[in-house]
Amino acid sequence: MKLFFAFLVFTLTLFSRELHFFNDYNKALQNAKKEHKLVYVLIVSDTCRWCKKFENTTLQNKKIKERVNKEFVTVLLSRDRHFIPKGFKTSPVPRHYFVDAKGKILYSSLGYRDEELFDSFMDNAQENYIKLKESNNESSTNK
């Protein structure tokens, strides 16, 4: 029984470190509303070497995965296979978008990013979200 429990804990720990991407933008928005999180949208091409490099390096970094899982709902959209909502550019790739649960783009970026730069992009997205919330609160207070 102890061996089974240890295996279960190990398995859950292993899987909790993986990023779980939606491939449906609208479902991701619904999930973000429920979880009160921002959405990270990654747009790639199936043949893009920089996209694969980003996925296989930056997104495999333990600290990046932990932060993304904690703070964002993630969406991976291939311009070759998935529906891309209006307002999102699909060329060149990879493209990074941070949006709120209503779909408002808060921050966007283009290209391969290492862990340090991607981490700063997440900071920028969070800062833009906080500023937007503050300005909305000020607007509603002044009415």
Image (cartoon, helix red, strand yellow):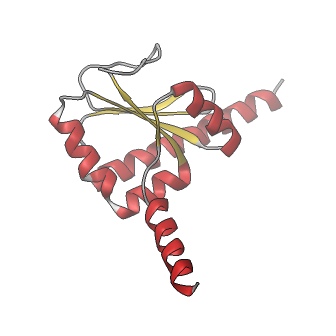
Residue 113 can be seen in this image:
no
Q: Is residue 78 above or below residue 54?
A: above
Question: Which picture quadrant has residue 23?
Answer: top left
Residue at position x 51%, y 66% in the image? 12
Q: Is residue 90 above or below residue 31?
A: above
Residue found at the very far left of the displayed protein: 49
Question: Is 13 placed left or right of 114 in the picture?
Answer: right
Quadrant in which the C terminus is drawn: top right
Query: Where's residue 28, x and y in %?
Result: 56, 33
Query: Where's residue 5, x and y in %?
Result: 56, 79
Q: Which of 105 and 34 is in front in this view?
A: 34
Residue 57 can be seen in this image:
yes
Question: Could you tell me how many numbered marks the image carries?
Answer: 0
Q: In this view, does 132 lie above or below 4?
A: above
Query: Where's residue 120, x and y in %?
Result: 38, 50
Residue found at the very far front of the displayed protein: 1
Residue at position x 47%, y 46% in the image? 20
Question: Is 142 placed left or right of 35 in the picture?
Answer: right
Q: Nearer the viewer, residue 57 or 7?
A: 7
